[in-house]
Amino acid sequence: MVESDPRRLTPRVDSVLMNPRVAQLTSILGDRFVRHVVLDVLEVCRRGELDPDQVVDEVVFRLPTAPTGLKRVINATGILIHTNLGRAPLSQAAIDAVALASSTTDLEFDLATGMRASRGTSALDALSRAVPPAEAVHVVNNGAAALTLVAAGLARGREVVVARGELIEIGDSFRIKSMLEAAGTQVREVGAANRVHLRDYQEALNQRTGLVLKVHPSNFATTGFTKSVSTRELTTLDVPVVVDIGSGLLNPHPLLPNEPDATSTLGEGADVVLASGDKLLGGPQCGLVLGRRVLIDRLRRDPLARALRVGKMTLAALEATIDGPPSPVATALRLTQAEVLERAHAIVGQLSHDIDSGVIDTVARIGGGGAPEVSLKSAAVRLSEPMAAPLRTGRPTPVVGYLRQGHLLLDLLTVAPQDDEEVLKSILGAHRQLSNR
């Protein structure tokens, strides 16, 4: 008997698209994308590599659940602000604010007068209230943009004096010196790699000096025979002092005594302070510029300000982060090791005996280029190393941990408590996947 040609049994494109499960995903993902996936799967079926009865299942498996290539990930790495995982997760208040801002809004419109208004005033007002010493504030699209705008707006065609040991490299191989030069300034390095004195700055000042820049080396720590010049000392110089505090603390934090904050730095006399919004502040990606009104107003009028300005959803998320309930980052910093241990034991207690698991003490880190010397006592669910891949690629939500001494560790300090149940389900699913191989 002649075997049936698989091409004759392959379903038609329209019949697959009309399947209720596929149609539901089409309403979310759009016809063009879904049709492309259907055509790919049907080609596999025509080659005889997939049973015709499995076409719909394969299409649904290949299609994402959201119309974006980004996937939600549960961060169990023990790094609280993980740059590769998108840095700070937003609070529910910030997420709700983004949803509201995604519609038509009064971004630059006064509803009372029917006239054009200043952009994002409520978000800027919230930032001003959070940092009282700031006479004025401005927001751009990230921390590097804040530095670029300030350098160009206050020292374009002039010199920026900065300590040699503070010319750091940030993410993706970008360097402070290169950014300053790209902004049209000339960098004047002072001091040695490990030590700099006030007299070094004094001797470097001249008629071409645009500003003195102090950069907090937030992504590393230097110990030993070192010396730096404080913000308060730098303010004795007759030139604007700009301080890039990096990780975005607006006010002092008891767990982070060596991490500078915007309020204290302005209180020490800095003319302008720069910070990131998506690190310790726990908000959206943005760059914060705070300081003297005359300088902030000058920066707002610089042509680069238009190119670097943020959108309405960023402004909404920032305002909700500042005025709303504690962010997930702030909440995680308040967790005790005992609380995390209790959660880890609860997860492991629901796993079957054939799953190699346990609970161990761990040390979590801030991450995101902040507070490198700070250790956070935590706890993790210990699993076998082969569980890493199926958890990382699992559905509906990947879980990313880290490997240590032949084990996979899922550190729960960086996992939101409401996600513990999802972590449990993902572990069980990963175990089933390994067992079926």
Image (cartoon, helix red, strand yellow):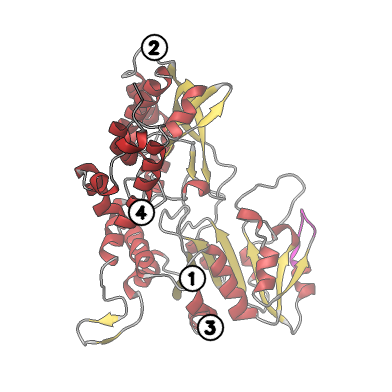
- Marks 1 and 2: which is nearer the front? 2
**Callout in the foreground (3, 2):** 2
Report, in whole angstroms, how far the alpha carbon at label 3 lies from the one at label 1: 19 Å
The answer to the question of whether label 1 and label 4 lie on touching residues, with beta carbons closer than 8 A, is no
Residue topped by disc 4: 33
For discs 3 and 1, the disc positioned in front in the rendered view: 3
Q: Which residue is mark 1?
A: 290
Dot 4 or dot 2, earlier in sequence: 4
Q: Is residue 350 visible?
A: yes
In the picture, the quarter occupied by the C terminus is top left
**Of labels 1 and 4, the one closer to you:** 4
| Residue 244: image tag | none
Query: For the residue labelled by badge 2, is the local secondary structure a helix, a strand or a loop?
Result: loop
Q: Residue at x 55, y 41 (%)?
A: 374
Residue 196 belongs to the span the image colors magenta: yes
**Mark 1 or mark 2, earlier in chain:** 1
Corner quadrant of residue 146: bottom right
